[in-house]
Amino acid sequence: MKLRDLFTPESVTLSLEAESKDEILKELIQLLELDEKSEAILFKTLKRRENLGSTGIGKGIAIPHCRSLVVEELRLAYARKPGGVDFNAIDDEPVFNFFLIVAPPLEVSNQYLPVLGKVAQFAKDPEVPGLLAGLDDAEGFLSLLEERAP
Amino acid sequence: MLSTEIEEGSQLMNPELMTLMELQDLRAQHRALSGGESESVEVEQFNIDPTVAAARLEEVIAELEGRLSPPVLKRYRQIAPNRERVVVPVIHGVCYGCFVSIPTATAGDQDVHNQVRTCQSCGSFIYVAS
Ligand SMILES: [Zn+2]
């Protein structure tokens, strides 16, 4: 499974508006285009996961993730926050790049963990943060995945 | 702006059903920290202490269980130990716990009467996904 195939242009934004951790999570959730009830549940679940320890893994990257019954298949979104935002990341630095990963409670194909690992690997590529900062549109993000996470 | 929308979403739902759905997700989080590959991802990539995190989740789970009414709690306790999904969606009239059609009356009643419903076939709590 290629990461490129798990994103659509609609699930990518390069201009998050939110300024706080909660608002960032909410804006990310909205990229998945769920119904309102599902958005509310997913927000609570992601927040509970963040309360166990930030998913900000350092170097300006955060990967909020959870399993939730509100999705029937693995769903991903990417968002960039120009200027960065405090996300209680492990290095205490602001976060610029957010990868949201939501998996159903049970998956036949078991893609969740391998995909989580692939996203973490992609994000930790030392050249990737600079390349993400230089993107002009969602298509550019998808091409970058194609190139760097084959 | 965004927060209002998402918080309104939670008000659309029967609070007890909302609690059951939260419990379902928390139980999935707890399982993820109880051994296996997902535990190692949380430890290695995200620096989580699985013992501390699991204990914290257990506290929240107990607190949420305490919010359920006695009949719902009773049913929950009956089904929770045996299955990974306590609440399942009903999509196009089909229960996603057992893939049996749910009578329209049962599925539709939920929003009208704002009650927690169960599937007559598999006993799971159901919610109507839109
Ligand atoms: Zn059923």
Image (cartoon, coloured by chain):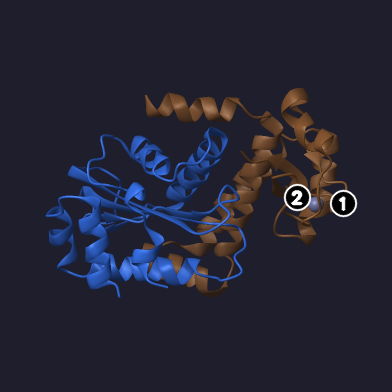
Which chain does the numbered disc 2 sit on?
A: B
Q: Is mark 2 within 8 Å of ligand 1?
A: yes
State which quadrant residue B55 falls in.
bottom right
Residue B25, compared with residue A125, is above or below; it is above
Tell me the tag on residue B121.
Answer: 1
Give me the residue at 63% from left, 54% from top. Answer: B27
Evaluate whether label 2 is on the same chain as label 1: yes
Q: Is residue A39 above or below residue A12?
A: above
In what element is the residue under mark 2? Answer: strand
Q: Which chain is blue?
A: A
Q: Position of residue A79 (x, y in %)?
A: 29, 48
> Could you tell me residue A61's position as x and y percent?
26, 56
Q: Give the CA separation, mark 2 to mark 1.
A: 9 Å
Which sits earlier in the primary sequence, circle 2 or circle 1? 2
Numbered badge on residue B35: none
Q: Is mark 1 within 8 Å of ligand 1?
A: yes
Q: Colour of chain B?
A: brown
Q: Look at the picture and state if B99 lies above or below B10.
A: below
Asked if A97 appears above or below A111 in the picture, the reply is above
Label 2 crowd bin: few (<14), some (14–19), many (20+), radius 10 Å: many
Residue A44 placement, left or right of B111: left
Report which quarter residue A1 is drawn in.
bottom left
| A105 to the left or right of B8 | right
Marks 2 and 1 close (CB-CB < 8 Å): yes
Amino acid bearing label 1: Ser
Image quadrant holding the C terminus of chain A, namely bottom left
Give me the chain letter of mark 1: B
User: Percent from the top left, x then y, of residue A135?
Assistant: 15, 54
Residue appearing at x 39%, y 43% in the figure: A31
Q: Going by the image, does B76 lie left or right of A67?
A: right
Residue at 43% of width from left, 61% of height from top?
B48
Q: Return the residue at label 2.
A: B95
